[in-house]
Image: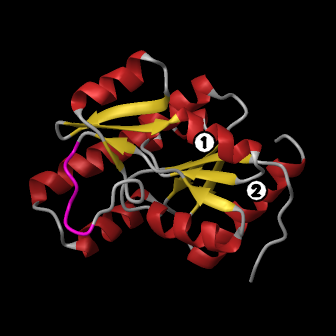
Amino acid sequence: MTVRSSRHGLLVVIAGPSGVGKGTVHTRVRSLLPDAVLSVSATTRAPRDGEVDGVDYHFVSPQRFQELVDGDALLEWAEYAGNRYGTPSEPVASAVAAGHVVVLDIELQGALQVRAHDPSALLLFLAPPSFEELERRLLARGTEDPAALDRRLTRAREELDQAHHFDVTVINDDLDRCVAEVVAIIEQARHEPL
């Protein structure tokens, strides 16, 4: 299924707690909107095997990253696990001006920074059907020890409390329904303000 698109560009942030399904929703939304693009973030971390500069990330030195921060060239940025990550402003602005939907895959802190830089951005909060379901999903991953899982769940509770800062909250209880709702919200926002 391909969704009819318009010429109006839009910056979209889809954020939510770990385990809610953001990555899957991002991928499906972009596959349904032919003019949707994923913004490529800048990072100070080293490339992992198979990662390509300019495709997976823009890999930059800590000094270059600081120049981007100082020059107000990032829509948002954050530090995580000793590395810095941020969204360069210029490519996003160019893509939106060209009529694309730019989907940002960023954390909650970054989403709120985007709102400060671009009040016209559409902020969607992806939420689980319940906290218990989110906990079940994280446990099913089997990728973390109990202490790391507890930290992730504590952070998830804090993030869920921030949903009121977003334009719309979408419950990811059924992937197909959730993706269809997100696409419909994006299409509506491209034609009329929320």
Q: Which residue is mark 1?
A: 92
On screen, residue 3 above or below 183: below
Q: Nearer the viewer, residue 59 or 23?
A: 59
The residue lying at 40 percent from left, 66 percent from top is 133
| Label disc, if present, on residue 185 of the rendered structure | 2
Which quadrant would the C terminus be assigned to in this image? Answer: top right
Magenta stretch: residue 72 in it? no
Relative image position of residue 87 (x, y in whole percent): 47, 39
Q: Given the image, on which type of amino acid does mark 2 rest?
A: Ile
On screen, residue 100 versus residue 67, left or right, reads: right
How many C-alpha atoms fall within 10 Å of the one at disc 1: few (<14), some, or many (≥20)? many
Q: Given the image, on which type of amino acid does mark 1 rest?
A: Val
Residue 116: quadrant of the picture: top right
Look at the image and give the residue range highlighted in magenta.
45-50
Tag in front: 2 or 1: 1
How many numbered dots are placed on residues in this image?
Answer: 2
On screen, residue 31 versus residue 48, left or right, reads: right
- Per the picture, the main secondary structure of the magenta-coloured stretch is loop
Relative image position of residue 188 (x, y in whole percent): 84, 54
On screen, residue 190 versus residue 49, left or right, reads: right
Element type where label 2 sits in the image: helix
Relative image position of residue 50 (x, y in whole percent): 25, 69
On screen, residue 92 above or below 64: below
Element type where label 1 sits in the image: helix
Relative image position of residue 129 (x, y in whole percent): 52, 63
Residue 56: quadrant of the picture: bottom left
On screen, residue 51 above or below 88: below
Residue 92 visible in the picture: yes
